[in-house]
Image (cartoon, helix red, strand yellow):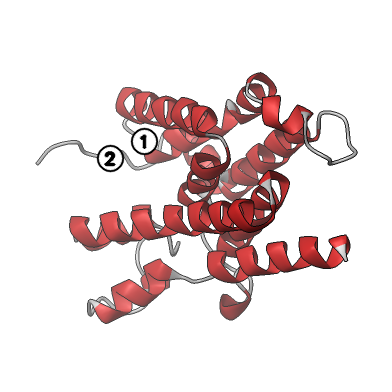
Amino acid sequence: MEFLTWGLAALGGYVLGSVPFGLVLTRLAGYGDIRNIGSGNIGATNVLRTGNKPLALVVLILDAGKGAIAAAVAWWLLGWEFGVAAGIAAFLGHLYPVWLGFKGGKGVATGLGTFLAISWPIFIGMAVAWLAAAVLFRRSSMGALVAFGLLPLLTGIFNDRAETSSVPIPYWFIILGFAVAAIVFYKHRANIARIIDGTEPKISFGR
């Protein structure tokens, strides 16, 4: 029965996370298929390349909300560990949505939303790191890489709830931090290559 409960939590999170808000909203706004614009990604950063900042903000909030809602609802109904499972499943659903041939976004907003729900100190640490790196380097991808690069450290610091959970794997929350960070770095491999050769586009903080 517990195995079924874990499966339902993960399935619910995955289904919610796989909703491609960036694709749906850009089509509704008349921009066509976002996968044919810019980097071809379905996330908020690529939606911003349409020039519609309010639309990109809405996509950012909805993508973050997928992870946060999945984690919060599962936590409320089943317990904190199930909330973690549902949130991570939503993160994977955004990365690999079945509806789009398992080709989705890069998971930054959904990952942040997940940690907002399951551990707000981790979210604050990641959000501050993202903002600082994005402002310093003027590259959104650098913000994401720095934020998720710190995730294993943050899961090691803020793991009180994980230490008292019933998951029978020592340090599983820290292992999860490494795994999520590795996935985000893998999804940003093209960005990393462009950062190295100096061709990664910069972001503007002007009006």
**Residue at left offset 37%, top offset 76%:** 24
Secondary-structure class at tag 2:
loop
What residue sits right under mark 2 in the picture? 203
- Please determine whether, in this image, residue 9 is positioned above or below residue 125: below
**Residue at left offset 60%, top offset 30%:** 151
Q: Which amino acid type is shown beneath numbered disc 2?
A: Ile
- Please determine whether, in this image, residue 69 is positioned above or below residue 108: below
What residue sits right under mark 1 in the picture? 139
Q: Is residue 91 visible?
A: no
Figure quadrant of residue 171: top right
Task: Count how many numbered circles sit on residues in the image.
Answer: 2
Q: Tell me the distance, in whole angstroms, between the alpha carbons under discs 1 and 2.
A: 6 Å
- Please determine whether, in this image, residue 175 is positioned above or below residue 40: above
**Residue at left offset 40%, top offset 26%:** 128
Q: Is residue 161 visible?
A: yes
Q: Residue 114 in the image: state x and y as whole percent.
A: 54, 47
Figure quadrant of residue 132: top left
In depth, the one of 61 and 201 nearer the eye is 61
Q: Earlier in the sequence, mark 1 or mark 2?
A: 1
Q: Residue 139 in the image: state x and y as whole percent.
A: 36, 35
- Please determine whether, in this image, residue 25 is positioned above or below residue 105: below
**In the picture provided, is 11 more to the left or to the right than 32?**
right
Q: Which amino acid type is shown beneath numbered disc 1?
A: Arg
Q: Residue 195 in the image: state x and y as whole percent.
A: 47, 35
Labels 1 and 2 touching (C-beta < 8 A): yes
In depth, the one of 68 and 195 nearer the eye is 68
